[in-house]
Image: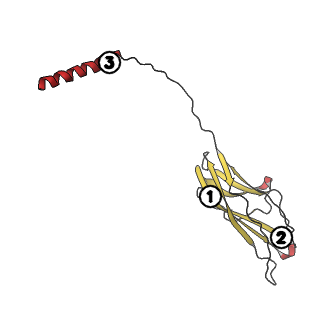
């Protein structure tokens, strides 16, 4: 029985060795170049609600401010740790009206509540600095609008806030 087992094993090994010796193969190689360019992406979740001041306190020029924290922003960047977000309006607000913005950040340093009332494209305000590489998703944006009674009324006035992610 042991002899039969040895003979069968030798026959199987010989057959495998023969197949391996006669096997043909074909090989092809390719060369390719890989790169990753700088990526800067920022998006917001939508537009905040209307900011309408409707109340004040007797004897106080500063009316009661209103806020909106219903929107978020997300970023992705792979450039470095010197990336920042700046904010500006399409046109400055008239004196006596103040618009502030606060962007939370998990990858950088938030400036806290920043006055963007007079920030236009040529004078944008840094609102988050030192943003590290990677992604930061669904971070809160809070707008606060305030006014002085001495500035008068302001008819509904649409403003565009631009958030720019740059190095």
Residue 138's tag is: 1
Which mark sits nearer the N-terminus, 3 or 2?
3
Residue 90 in the image: above or below residue 11: below
Q: Nearer the viewer, mark 1 or mark 3?
A: 3
Residue 73: x percent and y percent?
66, 57
Within the image, what quadrant is residue 128 found in? Answer: bottom right
Q: Residue at x 80, y 61 (%)?
A: 118
Which element type, helix, strand or loop, lies under badge 3? helix
Q: CA distance from mark 3 to mark 2?
A: 91 Å
Q: How far, Cα to Cα, is label 1 from label 3?
A: 61 Å
Residue found 12% across the figure and 23% down from its top: 3
Does 160 sit above or below residue 78? below
Q: Determine contact: label 3, label 2, CB under 8 Å.
A: no
Q: Using the image as rendered, state which of residue 26 and residue 106 is in the foreground.
A: 26
The numbered disc on residue 96 is 2
Q: Which tag is nearer the camera, tag 2 or tag 1?
A: 1
Q: Quadrant of the N terminus?
A: top left
Q: Which one is in front, 47 or 23?
A: 23
Element class at badge 1? strand
Q: Are marks 1 and 3 in contact (CB under 8 Å)?
A: no
Instruction: Report the mark closest to the observer, 3 or 2.
Output: 3
Q: Quadrant of residue 57?
A: bottom right
Residue at horizontal 76 percent and vertical 62 percent from the top: 116
The residue carrying mark 3 is: 19
The answer to whether 11 is drawn above or below residue 37 in the figure is: above
Crowding around mark 1 (Cα neighbors within 10 Å: few <14, some 14 to 19, many 20+) is some
Q: 96 left or right of 32?
A: right
Residue 119 spot, x, y in % from top left:
78, 59
Whichever of callouts 1 and 3 sits on the residue coming sooner in the sequence is 3
């Amino acid at each position: 029985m042991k002899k039969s087992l040895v003979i069968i094993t030798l026959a199987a090994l010989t057959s495998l060795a023969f197949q391996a010796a006669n096997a043909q193969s074909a090989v092809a190689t390719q060369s390719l170049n890989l790169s990753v360019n700088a990526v800067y992406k920022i998006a917001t979740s939508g537009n905040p609600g209307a900011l309408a001041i409707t109340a004040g306190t007797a004897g106080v020029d500063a009316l009661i401010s209103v806020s909106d924290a219903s929107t978020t922003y997300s970023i992705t960047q792979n450039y470095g740790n010197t990336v920042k977000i700046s904010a500006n309006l399409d046109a400055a607000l008239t004196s006596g009206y103040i618009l502030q913005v606060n962007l939370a950040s998990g990858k950088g340093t938030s400036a806290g509540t920043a006055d963007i009332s007079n920030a236009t494209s040529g004078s944008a305000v840094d609102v988050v600095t030192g943003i590290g590489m990677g992604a930061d998703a669904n971070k809160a944006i809070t707008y606060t609008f305030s006014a002085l009674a001495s500035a008068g009324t302001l008819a509904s006035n649409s403003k565009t806030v631009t958030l720019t992610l740059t190095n």
